[in-house]
Each structure stands twice: as structure tokens, then as C-alpha cells.
Amino acid sequence: MNIIGPDKLIWGVEDLAAAKQFAVDYGLTPQNEHYYSALDGTGIEIRAKDDKSLPAGLTTGSMLRKTVYGVKDQATLDAIKAEFTDREVKVLADGSLELVDDMGFVLGFQITIRTTNTEKAERVNAPGDVNREINQPGVTKTDVPRVQSLSHVVYFVPDSVIAEAFFANRLGFVTTDRFTGVGPFMRPAATQDHHTIFFIQAPAFMQGCEHFTFHMAGPTDVVQAGTNMVNKGYQSFWGPGRHLFGSNWFWYFKSPFGCNMEYDADMDQHDESWQGREAMIGPDNSQAFLLQYREKWAPGPGGPKP
Amino acid sequence: MVQSLKLTMNKILLGVIDDFAEEQAKGFDLNHSGSDTFFIVRSKNKLFAYKDSCPHYGDTTLPWKRHHYLNNVAEYIVCAAHGALFQIENGKCIQGPCLGQKLTKVPIEISEQNEIWIDQTIIKEFNL
Ligand code: FES
Ligand SMILES: [Fe+2]
């Protein structure tokens, strides 16, 4: 099935003003009262938790109310509708589909809203392999990191085997790598991103979103955007660092969405020839390295000193 | 006289009750580590102090922004990493990954002049 990846996450939050301010400070652009988007049009819809337009929430208190996937075309929507004869598939006014998955999460499917409106990946120069235009500084003080595209969602699920089977057998997702006893990293058929979902096996009372993230143009933008967040008073949860599975750079921040909100960049790309790996989860296998923020500093008391 | 002087030397003044509005919280970073190590909540005219450490993993802090320890309606203490809710009076987690576990209570003292003090031995013992 030609599913591309998450187009939109729909939230029912407790503190609407805080969540909207956080989204703007993170780098998303308000498109209307509810929708905050990245450069390519993907994004998050932020509503109050008692907003009548929202699908029912989980009993665990998770604020994530719906994950909407972007698909390639109407034929894919038709195929999804035909696949799920075992449950109700709503066709909403905008033509999108809505159904509940085997874990109880509400999923939506729509012809993707994502555009190709993203920036070039960060260009890196190395001896004999120059990728940045001549006379083009790699970083300046006035650079504004721009959020490119909704990347992935990580879910706490009560049964990661059932969750994986649902996405593999019913929706055509492929498992790229796996943490033993925890869960799989999966990518839909129409993207080469290492993962758009990762499942974490957890007790039923934890079911919900562990974190969600947007792609940035490169590691410099991850660290710059994260630094901007710290300077605005937001609190880091984990990072900056670089994961092993997926090779994506990361920096996670706690958020008013009841889960962490991450920046990521430079994720591995895979096709059918990729052989999935498996490892035990833990600090050593979760990241290649982990750094920690420090306030700007330079040798010498603010002036030239030998 | 000597006794009271000694006591003062062993304690650190954290502020006065009036520094806290009703249903408000505040984090403290006594060692200037860059991250708050404990916080005080004023609720229903009482003060409650807890380590700023979520029992989910045991070594990460709670708020998404400094001093934002309470939910919107100031009914619960919140860990913003995964939305855990804790009762203000006893620190017990009633929703979220650390369900049933408790925040670590930090002993503080309120003087007759409404000053809030913490003992040096507590700071050491709780690694604040
Ligand atoms: S770290 Fe606090 S709820 Fe997960
Ligand atoms: Fe991630």
C-alpha cells in the first residue's frame, strides 16, 4: 500500500495556550486557529481536550487523539477501505478515511498534503568531497532553523507484537530494525525513511504517545533549534545526540502535549534489500553519543586573551 | 542565642510563603547546576516540597518549562515527558507511566515568621 508517512497529528490538550505557544516556539507556522505546520504542509492540529470535533481519547489520558497518514492517491485510499471489512471505516467529509487500529488508536488516511516544499539537506564539506556552494558560510549567527516535515511518532503499546502485525499485514509497513522485547521500527511502503513509527511495549495504562518529531535539514539545525528552545526556557529531556538505529540526530524536549517533542535529522534511507537488525535496548545501543547543553562559553573573559 | 545562630548556619532560606501565589509552584537550583533539583508547591494554603525527579526513569526532571509543575487547573503535579499526574498532597502518581509510585518528598521547615528553610543535611541526603 502506498502510504507515505504521518501527515498530521491531532491533539486534545489541557493547556491550549501553552501548547500553541510551544508549537510556535518549536518552529511550526500557524495556518489557522488549530493547524500548525512545517515547511511541507505536514503538521499538528491543536484543540482543547473537550473539543467536540475530536475522536474519543484513550482512557490513559494520552492527548494524542488521531494520527493521520498521508497516502499517494485515491487508489490507495480505496485499497485501505477494501482491506478493513472487519471494522467500521468512516469516510469523512474531506474524503479521508478513519478507523481504529488493533491497539485502539484512531488512524486517519488522506491523500497526502505534503508538498516538496522543503530545503536542501545540510551540506557538509570534506577534503575531496565539497558539497556546499563556494563562498557559502555553513553557519551564521542569524540562521533560523526551519522545521521541514513531520517525521515519526513513537507509541507506548500494550502489545507490540499485535501492533507490528497490524501495520505489517494490514497496511504494508516494513520492519527496519528491532529492539528485542520492546518493539519494531517500521516504515510504510511509500517512504524510504528508516522509521515513521516505533512501538514500545508497555503496560496498558501507559498506552499513548512517547514522542513525536519533525525532520530538520541537518544536525546543525537540530542543535540550533534545540538551543533556541533552551534559551526560551524549555527543558530538554534527552539530547542532543545521534541514534544508532536510523542514524538520526535527536534532541527531545518535554512539552504541554503530554509527551516529548523531538527534533531529528539525517535519517537513514532503506529499500527492500535492507536486512533488519536487532539489539537489546539500553544506553549503549540507543545512541552513538550523547551531548549536553551548556551556555555559550569561550576561553578568556569575553575578549582577546592569549 | 548560640543555639539559634547554629541552626541558621545549617539551614538555607528558600524564601517566604508570600513568594508563592495560591496554587503555584517554584523550582530551586541551589547549586546552580542549570537544572532545578526540587520544587515547592503552594496548594490550599499549605506547602509541599518534592525532588524534581520523575519516578518513571528516576533521573529526569518534570516540567516542560521552569516552574511549570502543575497542570492547567492546578489540580495535579505533572511530568511533561509522558504526562504523568501526581497528587499534590502526597506525590502519588495517579495516571501515567509511574502509576502508583511516588515523588520523593523533601522536608522543609516553615518558621513563625513564614520563612521557608531547608536543612543542609537534607540537601546532602537528597542530593539537591
Ligand atoms: S519521565 Fe516522567 S512520565 Fe515519563
Ligand atoms: Fe524519535
Image (cartoon, coloured by chain):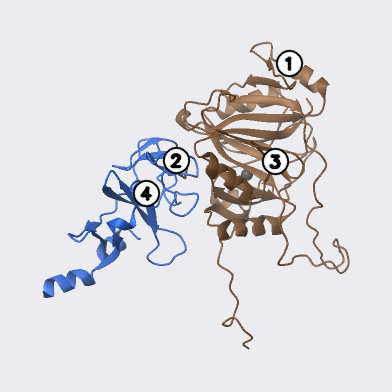
Secondary structure beneath dot 1 equals helix
Same chain? Circles 4 and 2: yes
Distance from the alpha carbon under mark 1 to that under mark 3: 24 Å
Q: Quadrant of the C terminus of chain A?
A: bottom right
Same chain? Circles 1 and 3: yes
**Residue A252 in the image, given as x and y percentages of width and height:** 58, 50
**Furthest-bottom residue in this view:** A306
* Residue A280 in sight in this render: no
Mark 4 Cα shell of 10 Å, populated few (<14), some (14-19), many (≥20) = some
Same chain? Circles 2 and 3: no
Please name the residue that numbered disc 4 is placed on.
B24
Figure colour of chain B: blue
**Residue A65 in the image, given as x and y percentages of width and height:** 58, 29
Mark 2 Cα shell of 10 Å, populated few (<14), some (14-19), many (≥20) = some
* Residue at the (87%, 66%) spot, across then down: A128
Task: Report the amino acid beneath label 4.
Answer: Gln
Task: Report the amino acid beneath label 3.
Answer: Leu
Please name the residue that numbered disc 1 is placed on.
A81
Distance from the alpha carbon under mark 2 to that under mark 3: 27 Å
Q: Earlier in the sequence, mark 1 or mark 3?
A: 1
Q: Please name which of the two marks, 3 or 4, marks the residue nearer to the observer.
A: 4
Q: Is mark 4 within 8 Å of ligand 1?
A: no
In the rendered view, does A262 fall on the left or right side of B1? right
Please name the residue that numbered disc 3 is placed on.
A150
Mark 3 Cα shell of 10 Å, populated few (<14), some (14-19), many (≥20) = many
Q: Quadrant of the N terminus of chain A?
A: top right
Distance from the alpha carbon under mark 1 to that under mark 4: 50 Å
Task: Report the amino acid beneath label 1.
Answer: Lys
Same chain? Circles 3 and 4: no
